[in-house]
Image: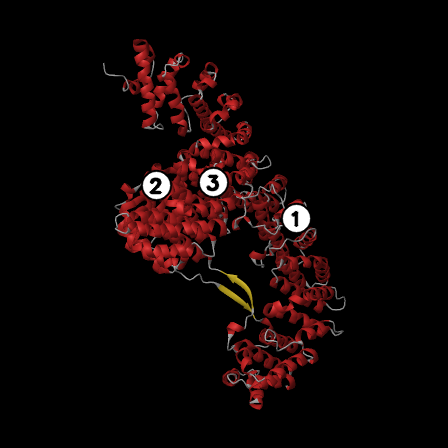
Amino acid sequence: MAQSLELLLIQFLMPDNDARRQAEDQIKRLAKDPQVVPALVQHLRTAKTPNVRQLAAVLLRKKITGHWAKLAPQVKQLVKQSLIESITMEHSRPVRRASANVVSIVAKYAVPAGEWPDLLPFLFQCSQSPQEDHREVALILFSSLTETIGSTFRPHFADLQALLLKCLQDETSNRVRVAALKAVGSFLEFTNDGAEVVKFREFIPSILNVSRQCLSAGEEDVAIIAFEIFDELIESPAPLLGDSVKSIVQFSLEVSSNQNLESNTRHQAIQIISWLAKYKANSLKKQKLVTSILQVMCPLLAESSNEDEDDDLAPDRAAAEVIDTMAMNLSKHVFPLVFEFASVSSQNANPKFREASVTALGIVSEGCAELMKDKLEPVLQIVLGALRDPEQMVRGAASFALGQFAEHLQPEIISHYASVLPCILAALEDVSDEVKEKSYYALAAFCEDMGMEILPFLDPLMGKLLAALQNSSRNLQETCMSAIGSVAAAAEQAFIPYAERVLEMMKVFMVLTNDEDLRARARATELVGIVAMSVGRARIEQILPAFVEAAISGFGLEFSELREYTHGFFSNVAEIMADGFVKYLPHVVPLAFSSCNLDDGSAVDIDESDDENINGFGEVSSDDEAHDEPRVRNISIRTGVLDEKAAATQALGLFAQHTKSSFAPYLEESLKILERHSGYFHEDVRLQAIIALKHILTAAHAIFQCQNDGSVKAKEVLDMVMNIYIKTMTEDDDREVVANACMSIADIIKDYGYMALEPYMSRLVDATLTLLREESACQQLENGSDIDDEDDTEHDEILMDAVSDLLPAFAKSMGYHFAPIFAKLFEPLMKFAKASRPPQDRTMVVACLAEVAQDMGAPIASYIDRLMPLVLKELASPSATNRRNAAFCAGELAKNGGETTLKYYNDILRGLYPLFGESEPDDAVRDNAAGAVARMIMVHPQSIPLNQVLPVFLRVLPLKEDHEESMAVYNCVSMLVLSSNPLILSHVPELVNIFAQVLVSPAETPEVKAQVGGAFSHLLSVYGQEMQPLLSNLPPAHANALAAFVPNS
């Protein structure tokens, strides 16, 4: 075999393709015989040309896995000995590298079986050789062997670390230093032991030294290896880096801001800052690095991109990502610096800096939302000024920033509509298509959350939008359709005059089939659904079938985004049509199933570069690729498929919610999909599965209630849903997904009551406790931080609001039986009420306690002394939401806290008094203060100085905004009237006026009106004809409303 194989190897390397193909076929045939191994070894040792020796080594690496177990011991020995000789004596570097790769594969099987005891001593000896080649190849082998037999190195870890550090500091050889860097990276990738990772901290100065030397020498590829190591250190769960963070940041900033370096090198440096901001934000804060980072990153936004360079590597784009990540994780440290940069740069003569000023504000608007809302006036001044800038790039950035504000600064941004909307309308006329497109985006985002405020602008807006829809490029038409959708959603019924024309135009878009037009078709499909929602079932039902048919036909066009928007369209139609949607289920549910079951289309790039130095080597396949694992370099997922899956998952939930028992034929398959998607790798799909499970549960109960064994089947579905939700609470790593699981559980408790939930209660309480202690998976993003910042407040408000809603849900379903569970949850909850916590946390606690007191009742008494100081302090909060919740809580504690609360009555009244005055700007706060006083009067009237309190109390009636307080307030007034309390009867004229306004108010319930009507009847029975002058002075509508309660004589 050896002789024929040699000829084939030479033939394989010929430039003649036919000769090569013949050789490859012959080699594949010979390679099935285990004797190919000694034959290849012989050529590795004796072939005259390096190319043949290298090819022999490459083939050996590919084929030895399948044959190793069948080889005789003496052949195995020959292989090992020959490989060692090749590594140490071979002159050609590519051959040495190829032989080293074979060693990695053989070691994977030989070392664990005890067949190669002298490999490790040999490598240690080689790594300390005076010959550079030996040191380099030993380090290369340490790198590759770590991936296959890393556990073998564990006993020698300390020696290995010392060796690697020494090689990193090798003064004589750049190649050795590079190989040492790679080996450090491999070890870090392999080890999960925090104690082992920590030891690599001391390598950082050497790594930085090597990197700086190599950058000076123009060897940027080495610097990139250093960044890969920092990347591993940062992402490691072990606590990093102490002062090392400072030196890594300093080096990364030097590289980031050096315009003489390659884009890729600078991008890697900026990426390290981004990872630190994401995973070690506390370290950046503690080391006071936020300012120095932003002083480099903000100006990078103004750097011009090279026309030829990859956009993804552009420094301005990478810097934007860093600023965004920092804003999300360190908002209060970031916003003042960004605002200062924007204020100064907005006046800069260089348009790139003016563009950067508004870009920066747009970028941080999500993470710094609460802080920006407080400075909205000056922020808008900068952005609206930029919208009138002579430079197109500045106007475009300003439009983008406005769109970001509209998305993230709700609802406060809407109150500025009078100044913002005219500016956007003017920008729609811009000479630049890019500015126009961004302005339509801003308009779409801004109008989405508007309500009736849009009406004065409706006509000019729709005039511009409909004209643009007819006369613009496809890109502009798409953004324009998105804007029309937002306007329709805001205007609701007021959109009816425009609906027919818009729907007519959409018919044209919904039959487009060219690839370049499909995105526009997707937007049109979405818009029809939104318009249908605005105008309602009665106006849309007759014309709907043609649109549904067009939407279904779009599924055959193989365009993921169109399918995604079509699922959204069907979801909207299901919502407006309710039972009328049942006839469409057989057509649309299979489409949703099909999208849910799509392959994700993962794309993986494999790094085989070492084997392909000679053209064509990669074509010879391995017998057993599964055992031959090159490094995965990059994994990318087709995001279009993810969005489509998320939309289809959402659609299934909404179909079930709106068609209830008619969804029966699809229930089983939907449950399987949602169970699978609740554990999906991407959070967008998991989120929709978690939301949809609640709707499926509702449908399941409707389906099974008419069946004999229905209760058993319904219990099975409830079991599945609750098990998924409880697991999600503690194990899912996405906060929004967990928040929605908590909200769904709270809804289920309200819908099904305690008895249905009792089997899950113990686990539910444990999961709630884990979340309150901030110990769940989604709260561990910076678990490895080297800072124990007990008062760190950078958590997700939405998540904790959802968690705190569980306690009232438990209390409502269990009443006073909740007391022992509340005792467990109380201290972890109160951690969020500490003075060091932000106002949102404290008001979350106060609102939660108020609702628990309301439903748990008397057991709250034992907590009064702990709670009352917090509530009294919150009554004076600068935040209206905090004052409102504190007033509500004070009332509920007074009502349910028994005698314990009496000693606080005067303090509570003193705290509430300012909320009744002119200085209180918020009607809802005043309504809750009235509710608190009413509850206090109802439980302990003798403890209230009614002569002082009643005039103040009655002056704020009727309630203006929070009508949930109506029953408590008017119940109290009625009780005082019906008991003929002399102090209330001195206010009869005011009472008659209040009662009349309550009776004509559309916001009040029939129960409240009956209560008030009864009190008015009592006044008539006491005062008779004396009431007539009061009634004759009322407006006719008010007098008529009262007349309904006049007793028949």
Question: Marks 2 and 1, how far apart in space?
Answer: 48 Å
Left or right: 554 in relation to 244: left
Looking at this view, is 878 or 966 the one in front?
A: 966
Q: Quadrant of residue 1029?
A: top left
Q: Which comes before the other along the chain, label 2 or label 1?
A: 1
The image quarter containing residue 221 is bottom right
Amino acid at the residue labelled 3: Ile
Is residue 943 visible in this depiction of the protein?
Answer: yes
Residue picked out by circle 2: 534
Residue 665 x/y as whole percent: 28, 55
Percent of width and height locating residue 390: 56, 42
Q: Residue at x 34, y 15 (%)?
A: 1034
Q: Quadrant of the N terminus?
A: bottom right
CA gap, disc 1 and disc 3: 51 Å
Q: How many marks?
A: 3
Q: Which sits earlier in the primary sequence, circle 3 or circle 2?
A: 2
Could you tell me which secondary element the residue under label 2 belongs to? helix
- At mark 3, the secondary structure is helix
Colour mapping: secondary structure
What label sits on residue 296 in the rendered view? 1
Residue at image position (47%, 57%) is 681
> Compared with residue 418, is residue 540 higher up or lower down, i.e. above or below?
below
Which numbered tag is attached to residue 821?
3
Closer-to-camera residue (19/858): 858
**Residue type, label 1:** Val
Q: Residues within 10 Å of mark 2 (few under 14, many from 20)?
A: many
